Image (spheres, rainbow, N blue to C red):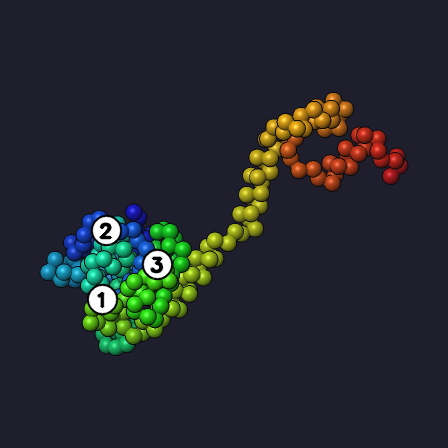
Amino acid sequence: MSNSPLVSYTMRSPNRNSPRNHIIDTVTIHCMAGNLSVEACGAMFARASTGASSNYGIDSDGRVALYVDEGDRSWASSNPDNDHRAVTIEVASDSVSPYKVTEKALAVLIDLLVDICQRNGIKKLVWSNNKKDRVKHRGGCNMTCHRDFAAKACPGDYLYALEGDIASAVNKRLEEGKEVTQEQFNAMMEVYLTQQREKETSTWSKEAWKKAETAGVFDGSAPQAPLSREQASLVLDRLGLLPEGG
Ligand SMILES: [Zn+2]
């Protein structure tokens, strides 16, 4: 299992279970309830006595830290089952309600979520304002909150109110990632046409193809390649079907 290439700071926490016992199919966004740098948050999680961790941290400058490998379960959400299946992300915030986060941190959070979904085969994020939907993963819900499992404000009212918008932004990016550019299509078409040119004659056409080659209508190559209009005119001409002086 891989970690995000967006990580620029790593400080592994001993507060984890290795490996996690469930595939990653959920994300849990947390707020730090303080404007901690990725280093300060890492130093806190590096102490065994803290008894807590998260997979990733994002600070107010938008820097991304790795504290617990994605392959391991972090101790983040007061619920082992959740953390065995979720990637947990701590985002630096104000230290008072609604625990606002910076625009930069929010933008990077969306980048990180897109990356997590792409690498773990999560097709889209599904949010519900109903806690039961979230904890029971009803209707494909795959975003949970720390407050679902403990008497906490986390992720704070600011991020909580944005969870649906965050899901939409991530899903839009996941959809865009699936679109094929004209350049990519042209390259694929080139490969397809080459493959067609390399195919042998079909059994049913062998006899006629041989006759066509003998008569000089075709040169015997690429029997299954598409026929262009200019090639068709050449064929008609070779058969003497076109009037002279045209
Ligand atoms: Zn939390």
Q: Is residue 69 left or right of residue 192?
A: left
**Residue under the point 58% across and 43% down:** 189
Binning the other alpha carbons within 10 Å of mark 1 as few (below 14), some (14 to 19) or many (20 upward) gives: some
Q: Earlier in the sequence, mark 2 or mark 1?
A: 2
Mark identifier at residue 20: 2
Residue at x-position 45% and y-position 61%: 172
The alpha-carbon separation of the residues under discs 3 and 1 comes to 24 Å
Which residue is rendered at x = 84% and y = 33% of the image? Answer: 241
Neighbor class of circle 3 (other Cα within 10 Å; few <14, some 14-19, many 20+) is many
Q: Nearer the viewer, residue 21 or 17?
A: 21
Looking at the rendered structure, the kind of residue marked 2 is: Arg
Q: Position of residue 78 (x, y in %)?
A: 19, 63
Element assignment for label 3? helix
- State the residue position of label 1: 149
Q: Which residue is mark 3?
A: 112
> Crowdedness of circle 2 by 10 Å Cα count: few (<14), some, many (20+)?
many
- Residue at the image point whose x is 32% and y is 66% from the top: 133
Q: Nearer the viewer, mark 2 or mark 3?
A: 2
**Residue 200's spot in the image, x, y percent?**
61, 28
